Image (cartoon, rainbow, N blue to C red):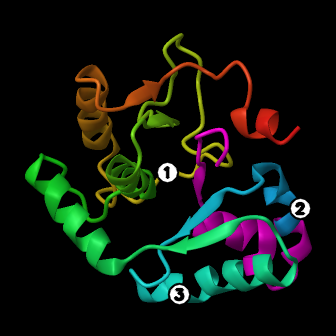
Amino acid sequence: EVTGKTYMLPACFSLLLYRFQNLLWSRKAFVDSVKVYNHSYIYMPAFSMKTGTEPSLRVYYTLEDFGAKQTVLFANPNFLRDIGKFWKSKGIHAKRLSTGLFLVSAALGLCEEVTIYGFWPFSVDLHGKFISHHYYDNVLPDSGFHAMPEEFLQLWFLHKSGVLRMQLEPCDEDPLIQSSA
């Protein structure tokens, strides 16, 4: 982009299911909700698991049908497998890595600078204020499915060594909304 910034957003399957009725009845509502993200990329793990293919294709066709500005990116299953092996060798032992860690891994391979926000595996923020697990709900993952504290620790090491920037405090302004004006 002209600004030199690219935004990549994950589309969470549970969010699609519960907020947008799996895009069966709420397609326009979904498109309206992502308008604020302008020409961003929406990341979908379409072929990494059987249950991900159908909703990923629904997102793709919904955005295409409505002429939305966003582009859907489908994750390569081989990349996901290899990244999983890499992070396991670094001490992250989980059934599956979080979508966020997959996105950070991809960004580190593609971008000169990477700033991340939202990686915080604790129930309180730096000031002791209670926070939800996701920005859209407080449903915790199944025990043993993700290893969020281990992921956070590895990302913290990358932050401390200058490989990426980890934003732990709330942002002053939402850069996506600011750039859409």
Q: Which residue is found at the position 82% from the left and 69% from the top?
A: 68
Q: Is mark 1 on a helix, strand or loop?
A: loop
Q: Is residue 177 above or below residue 166?
A: below
**Disc 3 target residue:** 53
Instruction: Give the percent coordinates (x, y) of residue 10.
Output: 57, 59
Instruction: Give the percent coordinates (x, y) of residue 47.
Output: 43, 85
Q: How crowded is mark 2: few (under 14 residues within 10 Å), some or many (20 or more)?
A: few
Task: Give how far apart the Cα atoms at labels 1 and 3 are.
Answer: 23 Å
Q: Residue 6: within the magenta? A: yes
Cβ atoms at labels 2 and 3 below 8 Å apart: no
Q: Which residue is found at the position 51% from the left and 81% from the top?
A: 52
* Disc with the residue nearer the chain's start (1 vs 2): 2
- Screen quadrant of the C terminus: top right
Q: How crowded is mark 3: few (under 14 residues within 10 Å), some or many (20 or more)?
A: some
- Disc 1 vs disc 3: which is toward the camera? 3
Which of the pair 178/22 is nearer the observer?
178
Q: Can residue 87 be seen in this view?
A: yes
Q: Which residue is found at the position 49% from the left and 51% from the top?
A: 140
The quarter of the picture where residue 2 lies is top right
Q: Which mark is residue 167?
A: none
* Disc with the residue nearer the chain's start (1 vs 3): 3
Which of the pair 114/96 is nearer the observer?
114
Identify the residue at the far front of this view. 2
Q: Residues within 10 Å of mark 1 (few under 14, many from 20)?
A: few
**Disc 1 target residue:** 140
Task: Give how far apart the Cα atoms at labels 1 and 2 are.
Answer: 27 Å
Q: What stretch is highlighted in magenta?
A: 1-30
Q: Is residue 26 visible?
A: no
